[in-house]
Amino acid sequence: MAVAITFGTSGRIAGLLEPEILNRFLDLDQGGKIAAEYVWIGGTGSDLRSKTKTLTKPVKNVKDLPVWNYDGSSCGQAPGEDSEVYLVARNIFRDPFRGGDNILVMSDAYKPPQVGEPKDTPLTPIPTNTRAACMEVMEKVKEEEPWFGIEQEYTLLNSTSKWPLGWPSNGFPGPQGPYYCSAGSGAAIGRDIVEAHLKCCYYAGVNLSGVNAEVMPAQWEFQVGPCEGTDAGDHLWMARYILTRLAELYNIDVTFDPKPIPGDWNGAGGHCNFSSKSTRAAGTGWDAIQEQIKKLEKRHAIHIASYGEGNERRLTGKHETSSMHDFSWGVANRGASVRVGRSVPVDKCGYYEDRRPSSNLDPYVVTKLICETTLLSK
């Protein structure tokens, strides 16, 4: 029997189906079969899709997974008359929903070989496959060992009203101030989902380095990293997928919109922390950081254009942001385009934070662009 249950306004909201019923079946023996959930990015560049492939034995190496396919016309990625799109497995994670030897598989998408082409013809990435171009750049800069830490902010919404979770149905909560890194009813809204997400990511092998409540009520953040190269994008997308699946169980929506509520509320960012071998070098790293920041300033407009749709609503120069029209940097300055940690000039090496990317950033695009600008441009 399907039931809908609500447990007040604290954020503990059950889904339309009773999850305890599913729990009866989760520990059933699978008869030696393994479920591999292939995950990919859909045609909007922000929607996540997935489907399950049954394997006959456990898989630990991503190279042992078969190339699969899906209906691209149903994802806005191919015409109906030629709808097949290939899926190539790129990264394996443990499945926190099914447990056991079951896996989640981060994948990217390619055009299949055409009739008459040799079987070993290299696959061509479809236009929405941003991972392929990222992988090319990361190969060029691999000697610099680029490390990334991405801060993913998001907002929990009531799935019916599309209003932030725990907010009054016909108004607003008290002004910002008591919510950041908060505890307590009415301040930390939706913590159940955050805690479940943390545990699921740990189990899955997603490199999650922390979580915290954010400045706007019902807004939270998780941090992915440090990750090297394309792993940053793989781990962030998988963390998003797991979060979306968890919210589904609670019948709650997750939005990565950079300004979900207009007005005197903080927007949502996707700050990208970056370092390379040269910036981490003892004694000379501080000079390398300043040189890289100069390069970022030269290409400010190019970065802004690729740092997330709707970012102009967030980068206004208010609410701990810089104006998108100007480039600035500073030590411990959260109102700058690029923030350098207080310890970096003291240690003479380290990392810096690009605060311009929005919460709906494509991490493959952002990490690729940062490496192109700082490590490949003159």
Image (spheres, grey):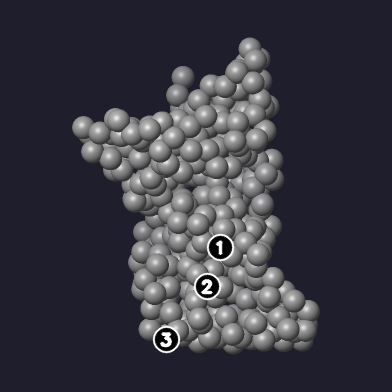
Name the residue beneath numbered marker 1.
Answer: 140
Badge 2 is on which residue?
376
Give the residue at mark 3: 326
Q: Is residue 209 visible?
A: yes
Residue 224 position, x and y percent, is 62, 57
**Residue ID at (48%, 84%):** 297
Instruction: First in sequence, mark 1 or 2: give its number.
Output: 1
Q: Kindly identify the residue that appears in the image at 65 percent across and 67 percent down.
A: 144
Earlier residue among tags 2 and 3: 3
Q: Position of residue 148 (x, y in %)?
A: 62, 64
Disc 1 versus disc 2: distance between alpha carbons? 8 Å
Residue at image position (65%, 71%) is 275
The answer, for residue 255, to whether it is visible in the render is: no
Q: The residue tagged with tag 1: helix, strand or loop?
A: helix
Which residue occupies 48% across, 68% down?
Answer: 369
Instruction: List x then y, in percent, for residue 282.
Output: 78, 79
Figure quadrant of residue 140: bottom right
Contact flag, marks 1 and 2 (Cβ < 8 Å): yes
Tell me the distance, in whole angstroms, between the alpha carbons under discs 2 and 3. Answer: 23 Å
**Element class at badge 2:** helix
The amino acid type of the residue labelled 1 equals: Lys
Considering only order in the chain, which callout, 1 or 3, is on the residue closer to the N terminus?
Answer: 1
Along the viewing direction, whichever of 376 and 281 lies nearer the viewer: 376
